[in-house]
Image (tube, rainbow, N blue to C red):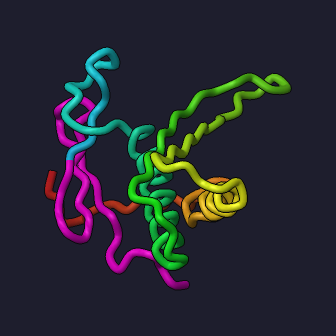
Amino acid sequence: MKYLLETPLKGTIGLQKYETTIHWRNGVFITDEPEKLGGRDLGPDPYTLLLSSLVGCTLATLRMYIDHKGLAVSEIEVQANIFYKIEDKASAAYMERKIIFREPLDQDIEERLLRVAENCPISKLLKGNINISTELIKDESIVE
């Protein structure tokens, strides 16, 4: 098995309600819930982080393609949101993604860029099958 990250992402939470510390390869950031849910809104919530992954990957993938093809596109904006809908008595999640280009583009280029966006790695991951394995590890070094 080959992991995508060199070292695992690590998160911790203490006694402060909903405030987590996330350690990634180059630093640390805080996640939290909005005040209306009991948090202090000190950082993005889990849904914002998930959508940020989609937005960031879409933008980077489009920029790589645009630069590779030498297209005259100076700025791209991507907006994303998520909602739930009841279908067949079960809740289904839907993500909406809007891609905004400041310059007018030919229709064939727009269609190519839409296909590129649909194939960014996070898009493909979210649309595919995701299996999550969870293991509980007791830290024996903690003395009670």
As drawn, which residue projects farthest toward the bottom? 1
Q: Position of residue 109 (x, y in %)?
A: 65, 61
Q: Is residue 39 above or below residue 80?
A: above
As drawn, which residue projects farthest toward the right? 88
Q: Which residues are magenta?
A: 1-29
As drawn, which residue projects farthest toward the left? 143
Q: Position of residue 144 (x, y in %)?
A: 15, 50
**Of residues 133 and 70, the one drawn nearer to the viewer in this rendering:** 70
**Residue 25's quadrant in the figure?**
bottom left
Q: Is residue 4 above or below residue 15?
A: below
Q: Position of residue 128 (x, y in %)?
A: 70, 59
Residue 8 is inside the magenta segment:
yes
Quarter of the figure that contains the N terminus:
bottom right
**Of residues 6 and 83, the one drawn nearer to the viewer in this rendering:** 83
Residue 85 is inside the magenta segment:
no
- Number of marks in picture: 0
Side of 7 relative to 79 (left or right): left
Side of 76 relative to 32 (left or right): right
